[in-house]
Image (cartoon, rainbow, N blue to C red):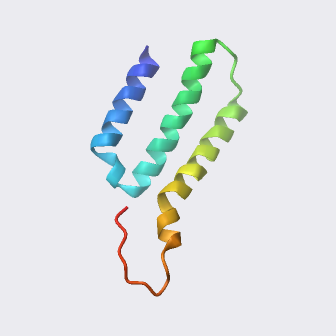
Amino acid sequence: MALLALYVGLTRAYSVHFKRLAVIHVILVAGLYTLRVIAGVAATGVRVSTRILAFSMFLFLGLTSLMRFSPVLALDVGSEEVVAL
């Protein structure tokens, strides 16, 4: 139950405050995905490996970074168009 309360609290904080801050957005979303993995482990009772948690944290961090910064990479270098992140 504590994991669910933590997840709901962090999701609420993300929705209200943190999605406008780029670095915090990336870290928080990656952390929420990892928290889902931990909650799944707790719900099923399966023993978790620290390697799996480390791999999932880095995977989710990379995917979230790509999701956040891909619009910046898609901009034309000579363009003066401003994209709101």
Count all numbered tags in the image, as a single digit: 0
Residue 38 relative to residue 84: left or right: right
Q: Quadrant of residue 54?
A: top right
Residue shown at the point (35%, 41%) measured from the top left: 14
x and y, in percent, of residue 22 in the image: 40, 57
Residue 60 relative to residue 19: left or right: right
Q: Is residue 62 above or below residue 80?
A: above
Residue shown at the point (58%, 44%) measured from the top left: 60
Residue shown at the point (37%, 78%) measured from the top left: 81
Most extreme residue toward the left, as rendered?
16
Residue shown at the point (34%, 65%) measured from the top left: 84
Residue 11 relative to residue 43: left or right: left
x and y, in percent, of residue 66 in the image: 56, 57
Q: Quadrant of the C terminus?
A: bottom left
5 or 76: nearer the viewer: 76
14 or 71: nearer the viewer: 71
Most extreme residue toward the bottom, as rendered?
78
Q: Quadrant of residue 59?
A: top right
Residue 52 relative to residue 11: left or right: right
x and y, in percent, of residue 7 in the image: 42, 28
Q: Is residue 45 above or below residue 3?
A: above
47 or 29: nearer the viewer: 29
Q: Quadrant of the N terminus?
A: top left
x and y, in percent, of residue 21 in the image: 35, 55
Q: Quadrant of residue 83?
A: bottom left
